[in-house]
Amino acid sequence: MTLKQLGAIALLSMGISAAAYAETCQDTALYEDMRTLAQNMRPMTQAIRSDDMDTARELLPAMKAAAESASQEMPFLFRDGAADSDVAAYEAVMADFTAEFAALETALASGDQGAAARAMQALGDVRRTGHGDFKDSSCED
């Protein structure tokens, strides 16, 4: 085997290894944040519907922290770069999302079930918009 052949094999091997260990959407911090949110959305909605504001208040910190963390991340869809306008649109959706958490927090603090339900509806709407615009199709579970 010549030195050139050995070098070619080494490069090919490294390329295959890199592809095998390439980051997937499930490997990102944003995915974990969104997973935390998804796991808590239904229990939060159920707590609000049953007027269990104590449980809802207990769920809020993890959800709010995940939303704030997610707002600092970029979608997997942008892994190869994105236009400034796409980044700005994502940042706007995430700002809306975190703003709705502020509304939810206020509603829960005051015990206003109706306002809390409206905030959850708004969170769901923003979530659907964000996923529709920025979720990479390879990120389906």
Image (cartoon, rainbow, N blue to C red):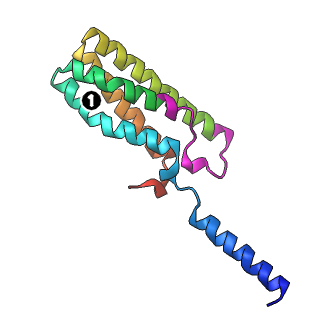
Front residue (pair 10, 33): 10
Q: Residue furthest top?
A: 110
Percent across and percent down for residue 78 are: 60, 48
Instruction: Decide: is 13 above or below 30.
Output: below
Residue 64 percent coordinates (x, y): 41, 26
Label 1 amino acid? Met
Extreme-right residue of the structure: 3
Q: In this view, does 22 lie above or below 125?
A: below
Q: Is residue 82 magenta?
A: yes
**Residue 15 placement, left or right of 23:** right
Residue, far left: 50
Q: Give the quarter of the image for residue 74.
A: top right
Q: Left or right: where does residue 14 sit relative to residue 58?
A: right
CA neighbours of label 1 inside 10 A, class few (<14), some (14 to 19), many (20+): many
Residue drawn at (25%, 13%), measured in percent from left and top?
112
For label 1, the residue is 44
Q: Residue at x 73, y 76 (%)?
A: 10
Q: Which of 52 and 17 is in front in this view?
A: 17
Q: What stretch is highlighted in magenta?
A: 68-85
Q: Give the percent coordinates (x, y) of residue 81.
A: 67, 48
Q: What element carries label 1?
A: helix
